[in-house]
Image (cartoon, rainbow, N blue to C red):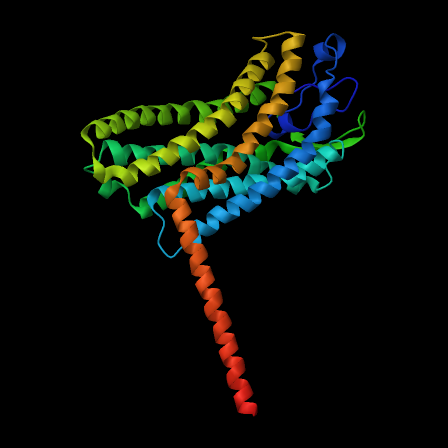
C-alpha cells in the first residue's frame, strides 16, 4: 500500500490485510486518484450498514441452530460455526468505521488495534475452511454413501470446527504480533497498521494469506464439488428418491459456496497482483492506482459475504426455514403458556384475598 501524496495514507482496507509502504515512485510520478475522497467518505456508512445487518442476521441463524429442540446435523454444525465467524467479523467492523471517520486516527489503544484485526483475519481463514468442511461432508454423504454413517458424526464435526478455529488463530498470529499503533507526524495521526520487520516478511505473510486462505482450500473444494456434481447426475438418472434430503443440503452448500467465491475471489486476485507489484514483478502508475482503488472495493465486497450467508439460508435452505418456523411456534407456545400461568396465579391470589 502506498502513501497518498496529497491526502492521508490509505490506512483503511489495505491496512486490514497488508502493510503500508512508502513508495517514492508513486509520490513523484504517479498522480493521486480522485476516487479516494469519494470512497473514503462512503466507507463508514457502508461498514455500519454491514455491521447492523450482519449482527442481526447471524445472531438469528445461531439462535435457530442452537435453541431448536432438535440437535444440529453435521452440515448445520459447520454452518453455525460459519455464522459465528461472520459474527466475529461484523462485530469488529464498527471500530474500523470510526477509524476511517477519524481520518485514520486510531483512538482505541494498541490492544484493541491487535484484537480487532485479529478478529477480521480470523474470519478470513476460518470462513473458507468451514466451507471446506461442508464440502467434504457433502462429498462423503453423496459419493461415499456406504461409509458416511461412520464418518459423519456430530462429535467429529465439532472436533473439526475446533481444529479450524485453532488453525485460523495460528495463521492470524502475524496480525497479532506485527499490528502496531504508530504516530505519523507528517499526517498527525496515530495509525493502526501492520508493521512488518522487513519487505521480505511482508511478501511472505501476504503470500501465506493467498496460499492458505485461497489456493489450498479452493483446490479441496473444487475437487469435492466435481465429485458431488457427478454423484448428483448419477442419482438423477437412477432416480434415488431416498437421497432428497442430502440433495437439499447440497443445494444450500453449493449456493453458499458460490456466494463466497463471488465475494472473495476478486479480493484474492487483487491481493496476488498487489504482492507481485511489491515484489517488482509488475510495475506501473496506472496499475498501482487501479490496484489500490480495487483493493478498497473488493475488500468490502468480501465483508458483504458475512451478511449474504444468513439471507441464503432463508431463501435456499428449506430445512433452515422449517427449523426457524418450529422455533418461532415453540416460543409462541411458551409465551402463551407463561401468560396463562400468570393470569391463573393472579386470579388465585385475588380469590385468596377475597
Relative to 222, say whether 70 is above or below: below
Quadrant position of the C terminus in the picture? bottom right
In x, y percent, where is residue 24? 72, 12
Q: Is residue 255 left or right of residue 37?
A: left
Residue name at image x 64 percent, y 13 percent? 288
Q: Is residue 315 visible?
A: yes
Of the pair 81 and 213, the residue shown nearer to us: 81
Relative to 335, say whether 187 is above or below: above
In x, y percent, where is residue 118? 57, 37
Q: Is residue 9 visible?
A: no
Residue name at image x 22 percent, y 33 percent? 144
Residue name at image x 56 percent, y 39 percent? 89
Of the pair 108 and 82, the residue shown nearer to us: 82
Q: Is residue 163 left or right of residue 22?
A: left
Q: Is residue 260 left or right of residue 271?
A: left
The residue most toward the bottom is 354
Q: Is residue 86 left or right of residue 140?
A: right
In x, y percent, where is residue 304? 56, 33
Relative to 271, say whether 246 is above or below: below
Residue name at image x 76 percent, y 35 percent? 102
Amino acid at each position: 500500500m502506498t502513501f497518498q501524496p496529497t491526502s492521508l495514507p490509505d490506512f483503511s482496507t489495505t491496512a486490514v490485510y497488508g502493510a503500508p509502504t512508502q513508495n517514492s515512485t508513486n509520490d513523484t510520478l504517479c498522480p493521486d486518484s480522485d476516487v479516494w475522497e469519494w470512497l473514503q467518505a462512503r466507507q463508514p456508512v457502508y461498514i455500519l450498514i454491514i455491521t447492523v445487518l450482519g449482527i442481526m442476521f447471524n445472531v438469528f441463524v445461531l439462535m435457530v441452530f442452537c435453541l431448536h429442540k432438535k440437535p444440529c446435523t453435521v452440515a448445520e454444525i459447520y454452518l453455525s460455526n460459519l455464522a459465528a465467524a461472520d459474527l466475529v467479523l461484523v462485530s469488529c467492523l464498527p471500530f474500523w468505521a470510526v477509524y476511517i471517520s477519524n481520518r485514520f486516527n486510531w483512538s482505541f489503544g494498541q490492544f484493541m488495534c491487535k484484537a480487532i484485526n485479529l478478529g477480521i483475519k480470523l474470519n478470513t481463514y476460518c470462513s473458507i475452511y468451514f466451507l471446506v468442511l461442508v464440502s467434504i461432508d457433502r462429498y462423503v454423504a453423496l459419493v461415499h454413501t456406504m461409509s458416511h454413517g461412520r464418518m459423519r458424526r456430530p462429535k467429529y464435526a465439532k472436533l473439526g470446527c475446533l481444529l479450524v478455529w485453532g488453525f485460523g488463530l495460528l495463521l492470524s498470529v502475524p496480525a497479532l504480533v506485527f499490528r502496531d499503533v504508530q504516530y505519523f507526524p507528517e499526517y498527525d495521526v496515530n495509525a493502526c497498521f501492520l508493521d512488518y520487520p522487513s519487505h521480505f516478511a511482508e511478501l511472505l505473510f501476504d503470500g501465506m494469506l493467498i496460499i492458505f486462505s485461497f489456493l489450498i482450500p479452493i483446490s479441496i473444494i473444487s475437487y469435492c464439488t466435481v465429485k458431488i456434481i457427478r454423484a448428483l447426475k448419477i442419482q438423477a438418472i437412477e432416480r434415488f428418491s431416498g437421497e432428497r434430503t442430502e440433495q437439499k443440503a447440497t443445494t444450500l452448500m453449493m449456493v453458499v459456496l458460490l456466494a463466497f467465491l463471488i465475494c472473495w475471489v476478486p479480493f484474492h486476485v487483487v491481493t496476488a497482483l498487489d504482492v507481485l507489484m511489491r515484489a517488482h514483478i509488475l510495475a506501473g502508475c496506472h496499475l498501482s492506482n487501479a490496484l489500490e482503488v480495487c483493493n478498497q472495493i473488493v475488500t468490502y465486497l468480501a465483508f458483504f459475504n458475512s451478511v449474504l450467508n444468513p439471507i441464503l439460508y432463508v431463501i435456499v435452505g428449506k430445512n433452515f426455514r422449517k427449523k426457524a418456523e418450529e422455533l418461532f411456534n415453540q416460543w409462541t407456545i411458551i409465551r402463551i403458556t407463561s401468560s396463562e400461568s400468570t393470569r391463573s396465579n393472579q386470579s388465585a391470589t385475588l380469590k385468596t384475598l377475597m
